[in-house]
Image (cartoon, rainbow, N blue to C red):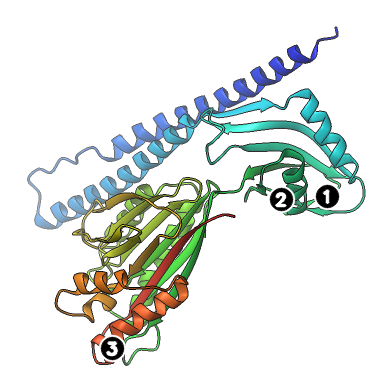
Amino acid sequence: MIIGKKEQERLEREQCAQISLLCRQKLMGYAESFEELGKSFRQEIQITGEDRQNILEKCMLWQSRQIMGDHLQEVARIMERVAGEELGYCPLEEKKRKSLVQALKSEGIIARDLCYVEKDGSSSGTEAGISMTLSTEKRHYKAAQVADMLTVLLGKKLQVSSGSPYLVEQEPHCFLFTEEPKYIALTGVSRAVKEGEKVSGDQYATMESEKGKLILLLSDGTGSGEDASRGSGRVMDLMEKMLEAGFDTEESVNMLNSALYAQNEEEDHPTVDICSLDLYSGECEICKVGGAATFLKESGGTECIGGESLPLGIFQKAQTEVRVRQLAAGDLLIMMTDGVLDALEDDCEERMRDMIEALEEQNPQEIAEKILSYAICSCGGRIRDDMTVFVLCLWENA
């Protein structure tokens, strides 16, 4: 039986929708199981007339079960969220598909299974792109070279999704090409180590997610020196792994906090500041857990974004403070550890805001160095705590 092109496209769309639905149903089933398992861990333990030692042991067991229950229910929520993210797969129009296939074939690249990929049915979402299975006849190509070809052919700037292979080879692989983001961000860091110490207890990191987000992390370990460095380094390592695995900011913080709380170490309570910037929309989510104030310099002035939350691991539930701001090209976001502000002593946040307001530099590295120099000069050159200044500057992607 021969079927027409429109019927073929309809069948392909239905097949993709069925696969997507089955995946979501499976995830929802797993989520329900984890939710019930979490509830069972959180059930109360009955404590009747027993001696003090048994009561303490049962209390510790109950506390551990509460933490495990929290973890399992967090996993359930993540699965529910992922299951709710609907991906739309839509075959390319026949004329466009043939044009792309022929153009790539002329370069020795074989393209199959071409389709648009849209998140939540929106062509403007950060996940929107074009998916295809690629292989070569002889020579290898970098996937980035294919992205450049598609940019010319489709008339829109495309890049290789971070989950795609680096090379197009003779063996077929699936590739996803997404639109380049509207903004690019440049960062700069300047640091100083506390007097008498060899290493800083502050740690920082920058990472990009598959969803077009740039994430800045800054952690201040308890105290100074190697112990503080290990504490903040562990926070950085775990946060990066959880964010890369697909956890959102608050989920990652909650799970990290539970892990530190379960250790029950009185002197290991690092802070963490997380800035998650959507490079497509400019929306910036600032999450603070015990960290020093963050400053946002815009065309209309400079805002001090402080917080009252405590560091990680003190309470069973993390005290997170999340603020959302809309950034534009030319805006500056400046994160710092408490050693920088403490060096200014009285009215430190106001003084720092005035100093940032007066800045004329646009290079983030120069700005970070200037702020650090200002802090060190303000305390007479005596560095009584580790200092780190982390600067982000946003620009339009020309």
Q: Which residue carries the number 2 mark?
A: 165
Q: Earlier in the sequence, mark 3 or mark 2?
A: 2
> Alpha-carbon neighbours of circle 1 within 10 Å: few (<14), some, or many (≥20)?
many
Give left or right: position of 143 versus 319.
right
> Which residue does the image show at 80% across and 33% down from the upper left?
112
Q: Position of residue 2 (x, y in %)?
A: 85, 9
Distance in Å between CA atoms under marks 3 and 2: 49 Å
Q: Quadrant of residue 97?
A: top right
Give left or right: position of 27 versus 109.
left
Q: Which residue carries the number 1 mark?
A: 169
Asked if the residue under mark 1 is in contact with the one under mark 2, i.e. CB atoms within 8 Å, the reply is: yes
Circle 2: residue type: Pro
Distance in Å between CA atoms under marks 2 and 1: 10 Å
Q: Earlier in the sequence, mark 3 or mark 1?
A: 1
Residue 41 numbered mark, or none: none
Circle 1: residue type: Glu
> Alpha-carbon neighbours of circle 3 within 10 Å: few (<14), some, or many (≥20)?
some
In which quadrant of the rendered image does the C terminus lie?
bottom right
